[in-house]
Image (spheres, rainbow, N blue to C red):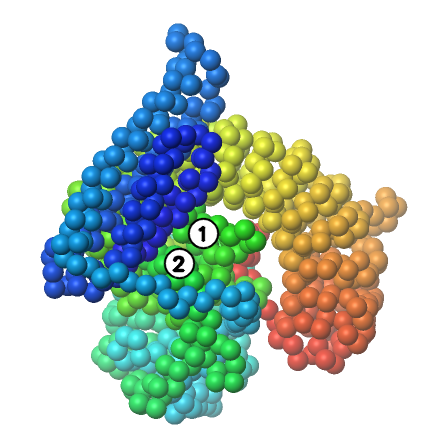
Amino acid sequence: MVDAVVSFALNRLADFLIDEEDFLGRVRQEVQWLKNELERMQCYIASAEERQNDDPIVRKWLNDITKIAYDAEDVIDKFILQVHDEETKPTGCFPSMFSCVKCKKKVILHDIGKDIEELKIRINDLSRIRELYKFESSSNKGEGNSSNAIATSRQLRRTTSFSIEKKVVGHDDGTTRLLAKLLNQDRHRFVVSIYGMGGLGKTTLAGKLYHHLDVKGKFDCRAWVCVSQDYNTHDLLLRIISSFGFTTKTTKELKQMNEEGLERYLHESLQGRSYLLVADDIWKKEAWLSFKRVFPDCNNGSRVIITTRSQKVAEDSDERTYVHKLRFLTFDESWQLLCEKTFGNPNANGGLLSNKTQLAKWKALKLCFLYLGLFPEDFEIDVDQLIRLWVAEGFVPQDENRNMEDVAKDNIHELINRSLIQIGKISWGRVATCRVHDLLRELAIEKARELNLLYIYDQMKHSTGNSSVIASCRWEALYSPAENCLLLRQINPSLRSLLSFDPYGYKWDIMTKIIDVYTKLRFLRVLKLDGYRPENWSLREEIGKLILSPDMEVELPYEISKLQELRHLFGKFYGNLEIDSLRKLQSLKYVRSKFWISINAEKLGNLRELWILGTLETTNEFHFDSIAKLKRLEQLVVKVHRNACFASLQPLTRCSNLMDLRLYGKIEKLPDDIHNNSYLKDDPMPLLEKLPSLMILHLGSEFYNGKNLFCSAQGFRHLEILKLDVKDELEEWQVEEGAMPRLQRLSIPKPKRNSKLRIPDRFKSIPPPAECDFERHWFD
């Protein structure tokens, strides 16, 4: 893994030489020397890693080169912070007010030159040891880099983005028996327990059963929850309720309830319903017993599936239990699995080896994988947030033709295809969450610790650590309330990421208490702390350059306009947003509609995601004219209040890159003499079908109340997901042959018994979007 760290440092040095070329002057040669020497050293790392287990001197050599790579990165960060700080000061020599910027520049360059001289001495020592121990140079032959290979790889990832892997090698015999148990006519609730050692495929088999069409059709509601070794009953109940999709209470209301209240709510919600619960990865019998009483036996054939490594847990889980011991794969099944994972389908171009690209990309993937060790066991990781974290960390190399977030998304699918991470939830046809198998998580933690990358403070396990390690590692994770964590009192000048996980497992945040201490953080997410007032923010310009995410409704400070590198801004904001100067901003969630109108949208030329919320006092129209100025916009979500409505959708036709459109509210303002509860009957489809890139369309909140919908033969050429919330007045949906050729998911309310609604036959068998309610907490 050392090669990944050195490769990362080399990428930073290369970017540094390009970005700061005008400023560096003669020091540029020193930086170039450092880059060249690290490249030479990198050629010998593979040979050294093969020998490190048998030779302590080789282990020390690898440790020393890792430290040099970290220190080289520190030199870059120190320089950038100093230069950008000086660029804000006036030029000229005014000793009484400011230091002379020209003189200060000389001092900065002198300092960086001195730092590199120290690194030179250390590198020369490593070169001497390398020659003494005759490390062999490794070659980089066999790196495929053809555009065809890359294009094929992207297409493969795209084809797997719409569904969880359904093909399971082996266990066909067990699947048949377990399906029979789930679907038999026994009306009593009983438990199906699957047990076996880690890595045998318990979760995969349970997932195959959970997503089986016959199983989906049998039960009124289904839920999946990962229990894991360090479970919390309150958290489990919340996640079970969320997975079942019960919505009579908001997420905020549920979080405020105690365990007894959650148990009562869940028990009442399940009454009269046939349900299926999968409780994955149970380590102790007490874990299941802690919430077993919540699940009633309503004499309607409900079932529970438990997966566990423990035979005792499997056998003692319930008085009515069917126990299934998972066997090992046979030799032929193991060979089949290896061939499919390595080479893909023999009749296709899939597999890991068939789309092998640059070696440098795999080195970047190593860091992406190690970073996953920060997350708690069985934690459901938000994929979009993980992508932004990787970009903020610098793990994703620059690509002239592609956005870094898109490259990071490819990394997600690459790790999925390599079975290094597992798919969690699917939302709007895309992977929304993922998790790491506990065995692979332990591997990531072990390797990251070897590189002094990671330290985890877990209050439940009473974690302690070497103070020198805590004070020098690059990533830290807190599994405890911040106010109780002594770790925050220790200053770590090397820290790049600090992830703090809510004790109930729902949020992970960076503490604002340490903003003025950790000057090299690349990610900022603000948690509402007791006694902390958001209006007292004092943002440092060098912090939060890529992501700023307050987790509460706040008014942003004026300093926000200084974060020129900010790419993603999340939170529920009120007051005017001083963001016109943020030219690199890509995501903005969630801005109130009345404040959006004061923003000069034309200056936000790189904005790709925009979510707008209506306000209670809004009674006028929401206009799309400003939206049309966002030429790179790919996702637009707008929800207006029930007293408001949308003006003409015509400006949206100028958003040629718009792929995901979700509108919640009525279309067009009504004349004053028409009753407020009436809606216009203008069909929106002829306009929306012309959007050339549209892949996802959701028209919600009774958007349309006419009698007919019409889609022409050339309409919606790229649409893949369609969700329509229409009223019973709709009588016919006419779709010409050739329209929507790529439609894969469709959701439309079931017509009532006496409804006149006619749906095209070819659409009746299209399934609804999976987990399409994943983001419903946005409306809480």
Name which residue lies at 26% across and 60% down: 137
Residue that numbered label 2 is attached to: 360
Q: Secondary structure at mark 1?
A: loop
- Left or right, 282 with respect to 523, comes to left
Callout 1 amino acid = Pro
* x 35%, y 78%: residue: 201
Which of the marked residues, 1 or 2, is nearer the chain's N terminus? 2
Q: Is residue 771 left or right of residue 733?
A: left
Residue that extends furthest to the right in the rendered view of this protein: 673
| Figure quadrant of residue 112 | top left
Tell me if 319 is positioned left or right of 408 in this view: left
Report crowding for label 1: few under 14, some 14 to 19, many 20 or more residues within 10 A (C-alpha).
some
Circle 1 sits on which residue? 397
Direction from residue 608 to residue 36 in the image, left or right = left
Looking at the picture, does residue 285 appear above or below residue 776?
below
Q: In x, y percent, where is residue 685?
A: 78, 62
As measured in the structure, the alpha-carbon distance from the residue carrying label 1 to the one carrying label 2 is: 9 Å
Residue situated in front as seen by the camera: 285 or 25 = 25
Rendered location of residue 348, percent (x, y): 52, 81
Quarter of the picture holding the N terminus? bottom left
| Depicted 215 relative to depicted 290: above or below | below
131 versus 524 height, above or below: below
Which residue is depicted at the point 20% across and 65% down? 50
- The structure residue drawn at horizontal position 39% and vertical position 82%, both measured from the top left corner, is 339
Q: Amino acid at mark 2?
A: Ala
